[in-house]
Structure formats: C-alpha cells, structure tokens
C-alpha cells in the first residue's frame, strides 16, 4: 500500500466539485485516510510549494492557493502516487486526457482544480503536512 496526497484547490471547492472528485477517487480504488477543509496561510502555501520557489508563477500560485478554502485528502492504494497522477491528468487542463479531473474541471494551467503528490516520498511528506501521524494511524494507514 502507498500513500498520496490530493488537494482540491480553491477553484474546485468554489465550483462545487468536492463530491465529484472524492467519488471519482473512491471509484478508482483509493481509500480515504484523511479529509479536511482548510484555508492555507501564506507561509503554509510557500512551504508546501517550496520546490517552486523562484519560478515565474510562484507568486500567483501562492495567491491562488491561499484565496479560499481547499480540501486536503490522504489517499491509500496500491501504486497510489502514479495512479492518482493518471486520474488527475496533465498540469495544463487543455492537454489533460479526456475524463481526467483536470480535463473535466480545470480552468487553465494555473487554476487546475487539484494537486497530486509527484513521488512516493512526497506522498508521505504531503500527507503529514495536513494530518498527524496519530490521525493517519487511527484511520488505518500503515506508514
Ligand atoms: P503539477 O501540479 O501537475 O504537479 P507542477 O509543475 O508541480 O504541476 O506545478 C505546481 C502548480 O503550479 C500547478 O498545478 C499549477 O497550479 C501551477 N503552475 C505550474 N506551471 C505553471 C505555469 O506555467 N503557469 C502558471 N501556473 C503554473
Ligand atoms: Mg507538482
């Protein structure tokens, strides 16, 4: 079993897609081990996206991610990280495969509805960004 982190970004919450997105990942065989609605502070958003610090879109990304509530999920499945990336689709919704979350709901390359961890290591790191080890253990997660 593998852990990954899915975020429903502010546009996904504002456009009322939380339920559709959770239903889709459950249909894809993911088990929800953590689920929380929250508003990211600027410093949390900067820390979460630290790898993109210095990129031209960094400031817009932080503004966008702090602009309204998000939903954070810790998801467990075999091959969770790569399977979630397939379900999410390409970063740019215009290039995302048909039926993927970003193709269905994304507005543009910046406002693309969801985040999914990009490596096994980051899946654990990002799940622990939003949920404590105790919460994950109590929900049945094996880290
Ligand atoms: P990913 O979310 O598909 O892993 P990353 O390259 O890790 O894509 O970028 C993180 C986020 O930064 C994207 O989901 C998107 O919201 C934003 N982003 C990435 N590239 C661009 C860009 O070229 N213009 C505007 N925003 C971007
Ligand atoms: Mg990424």
Image (cartoon, rainbow, N blue to C red):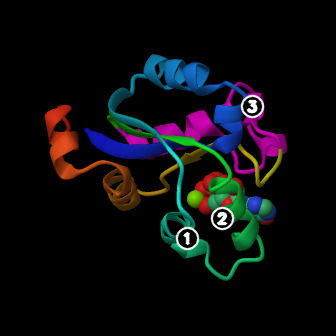
Task: Please tell me in which quarter of the rendered image ligand 1 is found.
Answer: bottom right
Return the disc, 2 or 1, that comes first in the chain's sequence: 1
Q: Secondary structure at mark 3?
A: helix
- Residue beneath disc 3: 105
How far across and down, in percent of the image, does residue 5 sit? 43, 46
User: Label 3 vs label 1: CA separation?
Assistant: 25 Å
Q: How many marks?
A: 3
Q: Quadrant of residue 14?
A: top right
- 90 within the magenta span: yes
Q: Magenta region: which residues?
A: 79-107
Q: Secondary structure at mark 2?
A: helix
- Residue beneath disc 2: 62
Q: Nearer the viewer, mark 2 or mark 3?
A: 2
- Residue beneath disc 1: 46
Residue for point 76% across, 38% down: 106
The numbered dot on residue 90 is none
How far across and down, in percent of the image, does residue 111 sit? 76, 48
Local crowd size for mark 3, using a 10 Å CA cut-off: few (<14), some (14–19), many (≥20)? some
Q: Are marks 2 and 3 in contact (CB under 8 Å)?
A: no
Return the disc, 3 or 1, that comes first in the chain's sequence: 1
Q: Is residue 142 visible?
A: no
How far across and down, in percent of the image, does residue 113 sit? 68, 40
């Amino acid at each position: 079993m593998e852990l990954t982190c899915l975020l429903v970004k502010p546009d996904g919450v504002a456009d009322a897609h939380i339920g559709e997105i959770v239903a889709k990942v459950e249909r894809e065989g993911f088990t929800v081990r953590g689920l929380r609605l929250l508003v990211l502070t600027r410093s949390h958003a900067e820390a979460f996206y630290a790898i993109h610090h210095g990129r031209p879109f960094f400031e817009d990304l932080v503004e966008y991610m702090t602009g309204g509530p998000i939903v954070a999920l810790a998801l467990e499945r075999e091959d969770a990280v790569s399977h979630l990336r397939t379900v999410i689709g390409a970063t740019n919704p215009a290039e995302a495969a048909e039926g993927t979350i970003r193709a269905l709901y994304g507005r543009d390359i910046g406002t693309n509805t969801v985040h999914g961890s990009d490596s096994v290591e980051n899946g654990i790191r990002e799940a622990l960004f939003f949920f404590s080890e105790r919460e994950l253990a109590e929900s049945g997660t094996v880290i």
